[in-house]
Image (cartoon, grey):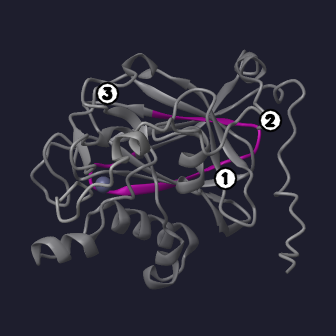
Amino acid sequence: MKRARNEVTEPQDAEARRRIRPVICYPVDTLPRPDIAAYRAAREGWKKVSEVVVPPRDARCFQVPAGSFFRIVSIEGPQVGDLNLWSAQDIGERFFSGKTRALHGTHLSTGDQLWSNLPHLRPMATITHDTLDWYGFDEYGGSVHDVIGTRCDPYTHKLLSGHEYHHCCHSNLTRALAQRLGRPKEEVEPAVHDVLNVFMCTGFTRDTGQYFMKASPVRPGDYLEFFAEIDLLGALSACPGGDCSTEHSSDLAACHPLLVEIYRPKAPPLGWTSPPRNGYSRRHED
Ligand SMILES: [Zn+2]
């Protein structure tokens, strides 16, 4: 863990160096902003076209055409969801949690966008409503919907406990994708990627910088709503950690299903067009 171990003597100007003010790595003033008012107006008269129930400790896939909306809804009880997104035409293009974090911060809410990996780097989805928006940051530095975690996985679990567990989010997402594509699990597993931790409440401890989780504030009826910027294939896992108040990677936590709802608007938002792939020439010249 990153903390002073007192193995080296501080330089005389240590405090002065620490006092230097930080600058934001990626100021987003130049980032084209989505017109959230236009997106919200497009919901008027929309139609729910399908829904998928994600069983506890399992995952399901769903498809959302560009220009439609989807909601991840809490039902029955507090539950965390691990979300993966791919381009419906090419699963090589997928959600890039690291760059999304660099652009929008550690936790996402209304107006933030979910970006795809290089070399595509374009918005895949835009968050249009978040019923947990009121939470903000708590006294521990925790907040909801993070892009700082990865997803619970059986490899880390094996490393730390020596045990095998087959219903971690990574495995759930792998099974769901394999089933959807009709391909073997080993073949699709590398397409599973770092997630958006929907409803999960997380942060980093101030003293050691360790990743922490705490009971999610989500309650049945809460939802996170997205607008699909491109044709999407999604997969959502109802984490075996339940509300992630104690532990994951086991069958001990109380777990609940999650609901995914797909909505088709009467017409796309005014002025909206599906974003093209990133315009960099890819010449990487020396
Ligand atoms: Zn999980």
Q: Which residue in the protein does label 2 denote?
A: 32
Q: Which residue in the protein does label 3 denote?
A: 218
Q: Which numbered disc, 2 or 3, marks the residue that appears first in the sequence?
A: 2
**Image x and y of residue 186, in percent:** 44, 84
Report helix, strand or loop for mark 1. strand
Image quarter in which the N terminus is found:
bottom left
Residue name at image x 88 percent, y 58 percent = 279
Q: Which of 108 and 132 is in front in this view?
A: 108
Amino acid tagged 1: Leu
Q: How far apart are marks 2 and 3 (CA)?
A: 31 Å
Q: Above or below — where is 268 with respect to 245?
A: above
Instruction: Using a 10 Å C-alpha cutoff, classify the residue at mark 3 as few (fewer than 14 neighbours), some (14 to 19) or many (20 or more).
Output: many
Instruction: Using a 10 Å C-alpha cutoff, classify the residue at mark 2 as few (fewer than 14 neighbours), some (14 to 19) or many (20 or more).
Output: few
**Image x and y of residue 132, in percent:** 41, 22
Check the image and name the residue furthest to the front: 12
Q: Distance between the residues labelled 1 and 2?
A: 21 Å
The answer to whether mark 1 and mark 2 are in CB contact below 8 A is no
Instruction: Using a 10 Å C-alpha cutoff, classify the residue at mark 1 as few (fewer than 14 neighbours), some (14 to 19) or many (20 or more).
Output: many
Q: How far apart are marks 1 and 3 (CA)?
A: 25 Å
Report helix, strand or loop for mark 3. loop
Q: Which residue in the protein does label 1 denote?
A: 232
**Image x and y of residue 6, in percent:** 16, 59
Q: Above or below — where is 209 with respect to 269?
A: below
Q: Which numbered disc, 1 or 2, marks the residue that appears first in the sequence?
A: 2
Q: Which quarter holds ligand 1?
A: bottom left
